Amino acid sequence: MTTIIRRQNEVEIDLYDKILGGLLGGAVGDAMGAATEARTTQQIIKIFGRKVTDFEKPPADAIGAGSERGQLTDDFSCAYFIASHIIRHNGLINQQIVKEAILDWSEHKVFFERFAGPTTRLAIKRFRGEAPADSNKMELLPLQATNGAGMRISPIGLLNPGNLDQAIADAVSATLPTHNNQLAISGACAVACAVSRAMLPDADVYQIVQAGFYGAQEGERIGREVGRIAAGPSVVRRMEMAISIGLGQGTPEEKMFEIADRIGSGLHVSEAVPAAFGLFVANGGEAMASIISGVNIGYDTDTVATMAGAMAGTLQGAGAFPNHYLTLLDQVNGIDLTNLALGIKKIAIRRQSANGRA
């Protein structure tokens, strides 16, 4: 009996470490990328005198101007609110709970007013019953196939250790309220499945990437059934290209430049999500290396680094990050990642037991 209890405690400790690692990876990527967002790699190096490898105060002309070192943008802060609301509802995940979480998040101006993307802003107006100014014009769906769902989806993977189909179902529920098209759903499911697979003890880079492909393919299929069809490149095909670059010859930095040039790292989901996977592979799943590549790739750096960091942080666990990062992120942003991780762990264990995975 003592041996069984010890093994169960070890499993729970490992699960907690992976959950906290995934949360830290997303938060570190977001806060570190806030200083470099919307610039090219060359501009980043010119401004900072080198690649950015730690938290920096965003320059005066940056999107994040006025933020402190370690301060989050919309990316991980929205994920934090969604995870918190799911915990508050004892693990229940549906569109209404996600709407409530996003509305709650939108009331915090430090995260929402300065950083929220166009698709999420439009959705929040709808949640509030406010008709958009151009409501009588044709809606341009391609402009809504953005990365806003993918950037906030990692807690869904953390809540579903190794259960890819449930991660997909939950990711669809978490995506539809704001990004109801097949491309955005595909990208969100790819990240959710990758994080879900990274939660298992035997996870490696190959298995995580394969899970991401499965999520992207299933997400697109389901998105065509339950969402709307947006014109744009396939997330799956772009992931194939980005991962091929990541597996190819050259240094991680050379691969970063090639991904930036051939795939892109911008607002569209078919750029940011594949780029995150490509950088994750190029850096062998190492958390800080993957994040630093995302921070310096240019364009939507905070989002790419958030997603790459969530995948790699879950794989490697909390020990992949400097000890003081957790304290800094909590203090600067008024959050509590430790308690959030504990809340997610409780639900994840219950879900594992219900699915015979404990």
Image: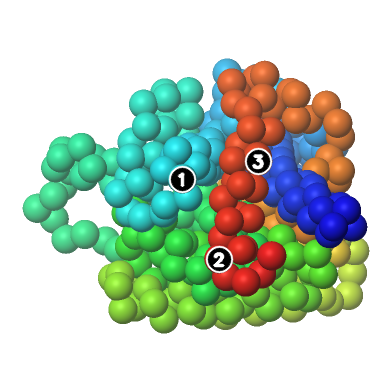
Residue at 46 percent across and 54 percent down: it is 149
Cα separation between marks 3 and 2: 20 Å
Answer few, some or many: residues within 10 Å of disc 3's Cα (few below 14, many 20 plus, some between 14 and 19).
many
**Is any part of residue 272 visible from this angle?**
no
Query: Looking at the image, is mark 3 or mark 2 nearer the viewer?
Result: 2
Q: Which residue is mark 1?
A: 90
| Vertical order, 244 against 337 (above or below) | below
Residue at 70 percent across and 73 percent down: it is 209
Query: Element type at marker 3?
Result: helix
Residue 128 appears in which quarter of the rendering?
Answer: top left
Query: Looking at the image, is mark 2 or mark 1 nearer the viewer?
Result: 2
Residue 195 appears in which quarter of the rendering?
Answer: bottom right
Foreground residue, 226 or 353? 353
**Is any part of residue 83 visible from this angle?**
yes
Residue at 81 percent across and 33 percent down: it is 54
Q: Are marks 3 and 1 in contact (CB under 8 Å)?
A: no
Residue 176 appears in which quarter of the rendering?
Answer: bottom left
Q: Amino acid at mark 3?
A: Ala
Q: Position of residue 317 (x, y in %)?
A: 80, 49
Q: Position of residue 77 (x, y in %)?
A: 53, 36
* Sequence-wise first label, 3 or 1: 1
Q: Position of residue 275 (x, y in %)?
A: 65, 62
Disc tally is 3
Cα separation between marks 3 and 1: 14 Å
Residue at 30 percent across and 70 percent down: it is 227
Q: Which residue is mark 3?
A: 341
Q: Is residue 287 left or right of residue 341?
A: right
Q: Which residue is mark 2?
A: 354
Q: Is residue 91 left or right of residue 335?
A: left
| Vertical order, 337 against 168 (above or below) | above
Foreground residue, 20 or 351? 351
Q: Amino acid at mark 1?
A: Asn
